[in-house]
Image (cartoon, grey):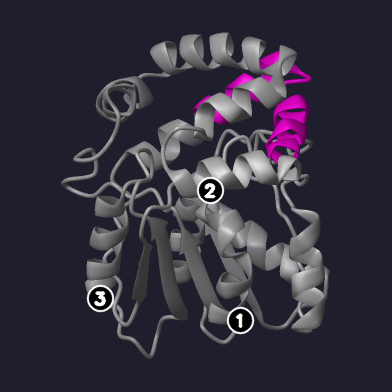
């Protein structure tokens, strides 16, 4: 997600993966954490990065979990990468330029989606302002971002402070170098906001990896409308809408996500 550095990993996830004979690798997108920005960066080129990383680690077959702002890259990977390598993809709280994407968004998120994320100047100003505040008080920033959307998320955040700490670590790491961190995030926003030009109708189910989509019914950023539309355009995909859940659905159902891969 955003700001998703390599620190974005809950301790319980690794334990859950080990019991399933899995290993988790967290890959930073260009401009996040210690990854450098690239002038020629695109969601398509990130698919090449994933394949290069897998080759470097001698990983023959793998699956991808893409969460929130990381889901666009996982979606493109599902489209681009050969099925012989990419076995399955789980898109959690995915962002997608659906026709009715803003239907259940908050007012700020609607403005961001329709206007702010299309302008580098405006995006840079807002991201820089919020980044300065978040770096000073990362836990407060994470709580304010996620609390109040659903009872499920509120209970998770209150009873599992390590969830807030995961986001806090990423915030501190991303904005330690404010100039680099802000630029990386703005570059990222400008990539996934526009039409991705993916024609899934040209792909058969046999050509694509298994794709599972999971979203909270109360998510006001990565809306259920985005997930539903994404499900409608990816052949053979499955969709699970978790009632009364919001953006922290990844943390509430991670073991179920692993089982879906």
The residue indicated by pointer 2 is 248
Q: Identify whether 244 is placed above or below 124.
A: below
Residue appearing at x 79%, y 81% in the figure: 19
Q: Residues within 10 Å of mark 1 (few under 14, many from 20)?
A: some
For the residues labelled 2 and 3, the Cα–Cα distance comes to: 33 Å
* Sequence order check, earlier mark of 3 and 1: 1
Question: Is mark 3 in CB contact (under 8 Å) with mark 1?
Answer: no
| Majority secondary structure of magenta residues | helix
The answer to which of 47 and 133 lies nearer the viewer is 133
Specify the label residue 202 is tagged with. 3
| Residue 73 in view in this figure | yes
What is the secondary structure assignment of the residue under circle 1? loop
Among numbered discs 2 and 3, the one appearing first in the sequence: 3
Range shown magenta: 164-186
Which residue of the protein is positioned furthest toward the bottom in this rendering?
A: 206
In percent of the image, x 34 and y 71: which residue is there? 239
Q: Are the residues tagged 1 and 2 within 8 Å (C-beta)?
A: no
Q: Can you tell which quarter of the image residue 257 is in?
A: bottom right
Q: Which x, y percent locates residue 183?
A: 59, 22
Q: Which image quarter is the N terminus in?
A: top right
- The answer to whether 102 appears left or right of 223 in the picture is left
Is 181 inside the magenta-drawn segment? yes
Structural distance between the alpha carbons of marks 1 and 2: 29 Å
The residue at the point 71 percent across, 28 percent down is 174
Q: Quickly name the residue at label 1.
A: 85
The alpha-carbon separation of the residues under discs 3 and 1 comes to 20 Å
Coordinates of residue 26 in the picture (x, y in percent): 73, 56
SS class, disc 3: helix
Instruction: Report if residue 41 is visible in the image.
Output: no
Can you give x and y, in whole percent of width and height, for residue 231 in the image? 29, 68
């Amino acid at each position: 997600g955003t700001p998703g550095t390599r620190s974005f990993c809950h301790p319980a996830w690794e334990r859950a993966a080990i019991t399933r004979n899995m290993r988790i690798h967290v890959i930073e997108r260009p401009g996040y954490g210690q990854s450098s920005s690239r002038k020629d960066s695109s969601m398509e080129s990130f698919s090449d990065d994933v394949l290069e990383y897998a080759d470097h680690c001698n990983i023959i077959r793998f699956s991808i979990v893409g969460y929130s702002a990381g889901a666009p890259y996982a979606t493109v990977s599902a489209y681009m990468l050969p099925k012989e390598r990419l076995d399955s993809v789980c898109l959690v709280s995915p962002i997608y330029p659906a026709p009715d994407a803003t239907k259940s968004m908050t007012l700020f998120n609607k403005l961001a989606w329709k206007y702010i994320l299309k302008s580098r100047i405006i995006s840079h100003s807002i991201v820089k302002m919020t980044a300065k505040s978040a770096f000073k008080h990362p836990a407060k920033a994470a709580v304010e971002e996620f609390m109040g959307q659903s009872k499920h998320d509120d209970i998770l955040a209150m009873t599992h402070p390590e969830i807030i700490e995961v986001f806090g670590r990423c915030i501190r790491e991303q904005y330690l170098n404010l100039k680099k961190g802000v630029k990386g995030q703005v570059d990222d926003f400008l990539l996934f906001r526009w039409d991705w030009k993916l024609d899934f109708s040209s792909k058969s189910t046999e050509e694509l990896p298994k794709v599972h989509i999971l979203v909270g019914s109360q998510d006001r950023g990565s809306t259920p409308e985005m997930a539903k539309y994404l499900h409608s355009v990816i052949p053979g995909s499955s969709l699970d809408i978790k009632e009364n859940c919001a953006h922290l659905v990844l943390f509430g159902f991670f073991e179920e996500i692993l089982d879906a891969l």
